[in-house]
Amino acid sequence: MTAAPEVRPHGQYLRAVSGTFYRAVDPRHLGTALAGSRQPGRYSPPGAPALYLSSSPEGVQTAMIAHGDARTPELNIIEVRVHAERVLDLRDEASCRAAGVRVDDAIAPWQQAAAEGGDPPPWSVRRHLEALGSYGVIDPSRRRPGLWHLALFRWNEAGTPQARVQG
């Protein structure tokens, strides 16, 4: 079994994260698995994709229960090696306060506001963090406490987090 990703301090309130993460991918899109979200998501407004990853295979399965439906095709779980700095850990209340982020805004429901053309609170959180120079968030699972996900706002550009498919 692969070791859990490492999370360590990086500056005053941000974190560095490295290790193996997991992502569910439609087999038809394996070649673009690291392109990020194709549809709006919690941290990805239209035109601003995010790369959503889980810190464990169980995290992927839990996320798919929350986001899958009868139209969701059979998905492959891939391993992605990540090295990311300047990530806010939403599990750390003191870091969130220092960054000026309300966790309730980050975890607020977003689908209905997005469907109605609104600006869901998590999208505002992303913009705020990007203005601070953050490249993403560690997002705790709301369905299974103890599991967590990584959402990257920028990746695989010079000076940003790096993500590579393993295997």
Image: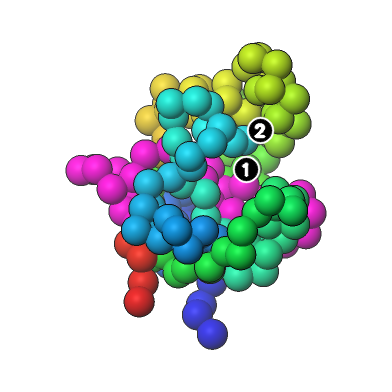
Quadrant including the N terminus: bottom right
Residue at (66, 33) in percent of width and height: 106
Residue at (52, 49) in percent of width and height: 52
Q: Is residue 47 above or below residue 116?
A: below
User: Looking at the image, do the residues carrying marks 1 and 2 touch, with CB atoms under 8 Å apart?
Assistant: yes
User: Which amino acid is tagged 2?
Assistant: Ala
Secondary-structure class at tag 2 = helix
Could you tell which of marks 1 and 2 lies nearer the N-terminus? 1
Residue at (75, 31) in percent of width and height: 109
Location of residue 163 in the rendering, given as x and y in whole percent from the top left corner? 35, 57
Secondary-structure class at tag 1 = loop
Residue of label 1: 90
Location of residue 107 in the rendering, given as x and y in whole percent from the top left corner? 71, 36
Classify mark 1: residues with Cα within 10 Å, few (<14), some (14-19) or many (20+).
many
Q: Is residue 149 above or below residue 57?
A: above
User: Which amino acid is tagged 1?
Assistant: Leu
Q: How is the image coloured?
A: rainbow
Q: Which mark is residue 106?
A: 2
Residue at (35, 76) in percent of width and height: 167
Which picture quadrant has residue 49? Answer: top left
